Image: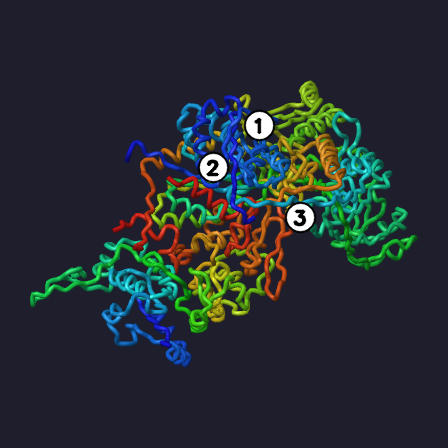
């Protein structure tokens, strides 16, 4: 825009909110004398219909091409006033707001003179910047109606189910050979009289019955290009070596010579290199664990269906989706060898191993026997891996362990009424519905609770017996317990390789590695990257109920995007001056969104910004060594003009 | 130093955390000294050390760059880019003879209005005894 | 018609710019054929009076190298300005202060004290120090030029029409600048002559060896590594200022596996060369942890000397701000 700036300054009283502390008359007179200002007016409520009319009238009458509104924070009414400009026929981005309420009148109401002076300076800064504003064009994209759900646990399954029910096509990918996630490995869930596997089974049935859902197991995310409404996805499907002709006859398992701990039973039992993760697994097809397979081909020889092909290769899959839901879950905290005696004694197990042992369908058929004898003294230690109990532990509370511990303790009590059961805890947090009753019931069932501050010492004696020693905080005494079984209530940690997914999708994470919401309270299931949603424990510890809830919530949020035909994006993005760009590519490494690329133009390489990917942080502009990269609305010259205006004496 | 000395301090505040914290200070009717003039940027990662040098050149008595806490950046790691730049800039400012009290990089989340008020008071308290920053133009034309 | 008149003058410089003029080699003969050199203290026997006698504005162009550090420099450049149609800041020192400009981190008193008394190699038991005026034995008063409080780039002392960058400008740049001036087709006042409007990376043979993302984990000083001359030096951890420095030098240092130190100065949009260099360089230090960042950047022992090597007097703050002005 080459025309001379003609600026109108509109100053709002906001009733007495501004006018009570700022001398409006004085400020209006001051504004009138600022460079390029054609008209300066005030009104009691600039955001009201008559207030907006004043601006529109000014634009028409004075032939204004820039508008400065001094009122509340731009987060309140920038949008309102942009519309006013548009309605008056000038580009909405030729507006500059001055925050003289939140950042002036309200905080300086004790000093009216200072508030008035500051309001003048802030307006001077805005006028200086407004003179350099440019008209900008909003960016719009068509929205693809498909969704990618990453993770086949309860959060991902419920998100997929809900989106499919709304008519969107869902691609659900799962890294493991089976859907169901961590919940599938849990035993009886608290309150519901349902086992984890059955809950997953029910959710899976709902998902599988929908023609809108495509499930890819053994599949990982390889790359994401594009942006909100139009993501180009690349997946890698790892070989399973067994195809859908498999009839689950189990002949292959009989001949497989390999024995490895079964991770689906938390190592409580072993499995073969060809195996079915668990009985109700979906898909109901055996899988070969290529890491442990010795390639003896015995299984291939005995398979009656010819379903095994050990030469199978990885496969690339390409998809286009409008939205992505990350429901990549968590991993249980695994104590390092020696922590609380774990890995040193077979009498020290994790809560999840206990769950498998207490499951009637599990490897021990629900029997809790050590060396053929029922344990008499059972000690649970909670907060293992959480609340900084040990140097390896995470600082947060894992939310589900207290209730889960109590639930399991009660199950043991039911089975073994004579056992001494102790729960050593840092704190008991039974916050979820019905959990407090479980806690009371545990007390009534003579399960003994004791509180520690310093991590209890688990002593494995040379004869294999175990003692637990700790300082009890309530009675203020050192306590010494003999134990036949120590159960470590382990917490949750971010899943392995989440950094890879997070880097591909470009989502931030917190200090512990869980993914970060756009806003913890206001946007809890959205990532800061548009079109990306977060569900389940990938954002931090949750119990099963909360995970399912967040899956549905993420689906609902995603559907508000997917039902739109087009998305609009603010054009305050980076822009390259190709004349000045030297192709040094510094900006490319600085951009967190991979939005910048080099293109060759007239034999020279210059940077190019993809408006669909740029989120407008401006980091590239600040690091551009030549000044060729700028950010619309926040150009070097615009920001410098504010600095100068702020400091002119 | 003159008692009338009122430092002028330029603040670069990121839109999502620190600018929001300043708004919160207002809606909570907190009070802080009127010496702080805010320039809103979308992210502290937009702040170029050149702007800070320009501010001091033009007589800013102090400069505050405020961004989201590490890990909280709306743009993943823009604040970290600011941290990298300001770490190096601080060393140069010192050599330019600008007292370290005059420049601060602070992480102020959207809920930390109180922190902004504290930082503002602290900065003012420390800058006032230093007196105005004088950077004279030194040309010999004419 | 008379040939255009040209003057050369040196202020606070090392003499390298004079050498660079001679480095034009046989082309210098073309220059001599095309112009009349009316003043060139380093090479020809003209006196100041000869310049004073010339009518104002009669010199077509004065090429001045070096920064203004002495009152003598100030006097001479003001004289040449008066006598010349065009004044050209020739070389980094004249354009932005150059290496002698780093002295702006110290007051004149500190500099004189160090140079005449404290430097380890100085033996000065009588504590002799230059004086402005001294009465010689014969009753004659001798005057020396004043050592000014700071070094100033030429354009802070007189109006400058064009700049020729480099420490020193290469013969190619010098020749291109001369061609431009002789062509009669003069660019806008304040332009940089003979060089590119893009940074060194544009011209650098190693630019294409950069990975997609230019990020570094470790900073190395040139003496610590034998750099691979076939790979971008920056990604090898060397502080290369090529991205932030005007191109046109032909990447001479790079071709000798030495990183760019920035002698061609900033591009037009840059507000403060050192500030921009810091911004770009710190941005690519690939750590998120505060301590790691500090540790890695701590490897830069002398940030002023690295990032403001040629431009301190032209920077936004000109040098140490506490140095008293005259």
**Closer-to-camera residue (C210/A190):** C210
How would you rate the neighbour count of disc 2 (Cα within 10 Å): few for under 14, some for 14-19, many for 20 or more? many
- Which chain's residue wears label 1? A
- Which chain's residue wears label 2? B
Q: Whole-percent x and y of residue A351?
A: 69, 34
Marks 2/1 in contact by CB < 8 Å: the verdict is no
**Residue identified by numbered label 1:** A51
* Distance between the alpha carbons at the discs numbered 2 and 1: 26 Å
* Distance between the alpha carbons at the discs numbered 1 and 3: 35 Å
How would you rate the neighbour count of disc 3 (Cα within 10 Å): few for under 14, some for 14-19, many for 20 or more? some
Q: Secondary structure at mark 1?
A: helix
**Residue identified by numbered label 3:** A612
**Closer-to-camera residue (A159/A60):** A60
Is disc 3 on the same chain as disc 1? yes
Establish if C99 lies above or below A364: below
Establish if C207 lies above or below A555: below
Query: Of circles 2 and 1, which is in front?
Result: 1
Query: Of circles 1 and 3, which is in front?
Result: 1
Q: Secondary structure at mark 3?
A: loop
Give the image quarter of residue A187.
top right
Q: Whole-percent x and y of residue A9?
A: 51, 34
> What residue sits 42% from the left and 23% below the top?
A110
**Closer-to-camera residue (C119/C81):** C81
Q: Whole-percent x and y of residue A327?
A: 71, 40
* Distance between the alpha carbons at the discs numbered 2 and 3: 30 Å
- Could you tell me if residue A355 is visible in this image? no
Q: Secondary structure at mark 2?
A: strand
Residue lying farthest to the top in this orientation: A444
**Residue identified by numbered label 2:** B38
Q: Is residue B120 left or right of residue A173?
A: left
């Amino acid at each position: 825009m080459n025309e001379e700036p003609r600026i109108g300054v509109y100053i709002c009283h906001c009733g007495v909110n501004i006018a009570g502390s700022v001398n409006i008359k004085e400020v209006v007179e001051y504004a009138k004398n600022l460079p390029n200002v054609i008209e300066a007016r005030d009104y009691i409520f600039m955001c009201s219909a008559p207030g907006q009319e004043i601006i529109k009238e000014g634009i028409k009458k004075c032939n204004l091409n820039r508008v400065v509104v001094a009122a509340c924070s731009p987060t309140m009414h920038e949008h309102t006033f942009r519309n006013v400009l548009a309605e008056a026929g000038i580009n909405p981005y030729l507006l500059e707001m001055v925050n003289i309420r939140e950042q002036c009148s309200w905080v300086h109401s004790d000093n009216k003179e200072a508030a008035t002076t500051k309001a003048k300076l802030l307006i001077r800064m805005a006028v200086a910047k407004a003179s350099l504003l440019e008209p900008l064009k909003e960016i719009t994209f068509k929205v693809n109606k498909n969704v990618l759900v990453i993770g086949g646990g309860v959060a991902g399954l419920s998100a997929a189910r809900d989106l499919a029910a709304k008519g969107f096509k869902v691609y659900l990918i799962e890294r493991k050979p089976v859907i169901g996630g961590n919940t599938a490995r849990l035993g009886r869930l608290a309150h519901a009289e349902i086992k984890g596997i059955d809950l997953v089974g029910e959710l899976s049935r709902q998902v599988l019955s929908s023609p809108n859902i495509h499930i890819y197991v053994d599949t990982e995310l390889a790359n994401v290009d594009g942006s909100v409404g139009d993501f180009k996805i690349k997946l890698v499907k790892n070989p399973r070596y067994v195809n859908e002709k498999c009839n689950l006859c189990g002949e292959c398992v009989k001949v497989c010579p390999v024995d490895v701990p079964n991770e689906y039973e938390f190592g409580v039992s072993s499995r073969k290199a060809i195996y079915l993760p668990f009985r109700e697994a979906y898909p109901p097809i055996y899988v070969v664990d290529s890491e442990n397979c010795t390639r003896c081909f015995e299984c291939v020889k005995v398979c009656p269906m010819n379903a095994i092909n050990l030469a199978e290769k990885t496969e690339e899959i390409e998809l286009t989706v409008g939205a992505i839901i990350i429901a990549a879950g968590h991993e249980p905290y695994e104590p390092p060898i020696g922590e609380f005696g774990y890995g040193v004694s077979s009498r020290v197990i994790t809560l999840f191993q206990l769950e498998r042992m207490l499951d009637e369908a599990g490897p021990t058929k629900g029997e809790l026997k050590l060396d053929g004898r029922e344990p008499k003294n059972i000690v649970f230690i909670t907060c293992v891996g959480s609340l900084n109990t040990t140097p390896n532990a995470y600082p947060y509370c894992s939310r589900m362990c207290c209730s889960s511990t109590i639930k399991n303790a009660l199950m043991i009590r039911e089975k073994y009424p004579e056992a001494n059961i102790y729960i050593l805890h840092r704190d008991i947090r039974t916050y979820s519905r019905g959990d407090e009753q479980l806690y009371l019931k545990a007390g009534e069932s003579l399960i003994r609770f004791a509180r520690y501050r310093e991590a209890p010492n688990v002593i494995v004696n040379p004869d294999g017996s175990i003692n637990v020693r700790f300082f009890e905080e309530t009675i203020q005494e050192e306590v010494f317990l003999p134990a036949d079984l120590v159960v470590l209530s382990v917490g949750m940690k971010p899943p392995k390789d989440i950094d890879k997914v997070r880097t591909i999708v470009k989502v931030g994470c917190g200090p512990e590695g869980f993914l970060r919401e756009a806003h913890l309270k206001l946007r809890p299931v959205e990532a800061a990257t548009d079109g990306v949603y977060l569900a389940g424990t990938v954002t931090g510890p949750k119990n099963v109920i909360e995970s399912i809830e967040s899956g549905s919530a993420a689906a609902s949020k995603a559907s508000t995007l997917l039902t739109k035909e087009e998305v609009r994006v603010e054009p305050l993005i980076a822009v390259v001056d190709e004349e000045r760009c030297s192709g040094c590519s510094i900006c490319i490494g600085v951009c967190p969104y991979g939005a910048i690329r080099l293109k060759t133009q007239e034999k020279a390489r210059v940077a190019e910004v993809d408006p669909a990917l740029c989120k407008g942080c401006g980091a590239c502009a600040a690091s551009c060594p030549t000044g060729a990269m700028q950010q619309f609305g926040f150009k070097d010259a615009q920001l410098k003009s504010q600095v100068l205006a702020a400091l002119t004496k | 130093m003159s008692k009338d000395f009122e430092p002028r301090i330029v603040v670069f505040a990121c839109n999502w955390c620190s600018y929001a914290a300043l708004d919160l200070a207002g809606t909570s009717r907190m009070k802080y000294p009127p010496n702080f003039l805010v320039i809103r940027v979308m992210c502290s990662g937009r702040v170029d050390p050149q702007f800070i040098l320009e501010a001091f050149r033009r007589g800013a008595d102090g400069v505050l760059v405020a961004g989201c806490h590490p890990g909280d950046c709306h743009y993943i790691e823009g604040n970290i880019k600011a941290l990298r730049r300001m770490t190096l800039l601080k060393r140069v400012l010192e050599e330019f003879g600008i007292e370290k009290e005059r420049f601060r990089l602070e992480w102020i989340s959207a809920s930390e209005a109180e922190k902004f008020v504290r930082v503002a008071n602290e900065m003012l308290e420390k800058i006032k005894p230093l007196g105005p920053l004088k950077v004279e133009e030194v040309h010999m034309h004419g | 018609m008379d040939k255009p008149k040209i003057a050369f003058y040196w202020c606070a410089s090392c003499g390298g710019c004079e050498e660079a003029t001679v480095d034009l080699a046989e082309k210098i003969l073309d220059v001599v054929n095309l112009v009349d050199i009316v003043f060139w203290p380093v090479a020809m026997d003209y006196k100041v009076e000869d310049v004073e006698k010339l009518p104002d504005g009669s010199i077509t162009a004065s090429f001045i190298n070096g920064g203004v550090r002495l009152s003598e420099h100030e006097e001479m450049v003001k004289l040449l300005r008066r006598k010349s149609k065009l004044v050209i800041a020739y070389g980094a020192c004249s354009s932005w202060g150059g290496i002698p400009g780093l002295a702006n981190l110290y007051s004149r008193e500190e500099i004189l004290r160090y140079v005449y008394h404290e430097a380890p190699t100085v033996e000065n038991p009588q504590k002799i120090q230059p004086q402005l005026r001294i009465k010689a034995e014969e009753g004659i008063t001798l005057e020396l030029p004043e050592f000014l409080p700071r070094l100033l780039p030429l354009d802070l002392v007189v109006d400058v029409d064009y700049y020729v960058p480099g420490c020193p400008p290469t013969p190619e740049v010098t020749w291109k600048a001369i061609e431009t001036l002789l062509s009669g087709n003069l660019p806008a006042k304040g332009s940089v002559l003979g060089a590119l409007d893009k940074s060194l990376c544009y011209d650098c043979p190693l630019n294409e060896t950069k990975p997609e993302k230019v990020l570094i984990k470790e900073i190395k000083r040139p003496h610590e590594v034998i750099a691979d001359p076939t790979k971008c030096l920056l990604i090898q951890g060397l502080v290369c200022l090529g991205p932030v420095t005007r191109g046109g030098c032909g990447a001479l240092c790079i071709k000798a596996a030495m990183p760019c130190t920035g002698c061609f100065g900033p591009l037009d949009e840059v507000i403060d060369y050192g500030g921009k260099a810091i911004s770009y360089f710190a941005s690519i230090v690939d750590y998120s942890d505060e301590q790691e960042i500090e540790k890695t950047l701590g490897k830069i022992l002398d940030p002023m000397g690295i990032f403001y090597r040629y431009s301190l007097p032209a920077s936004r703050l000109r040098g140490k701000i506490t140095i008293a002005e005259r």
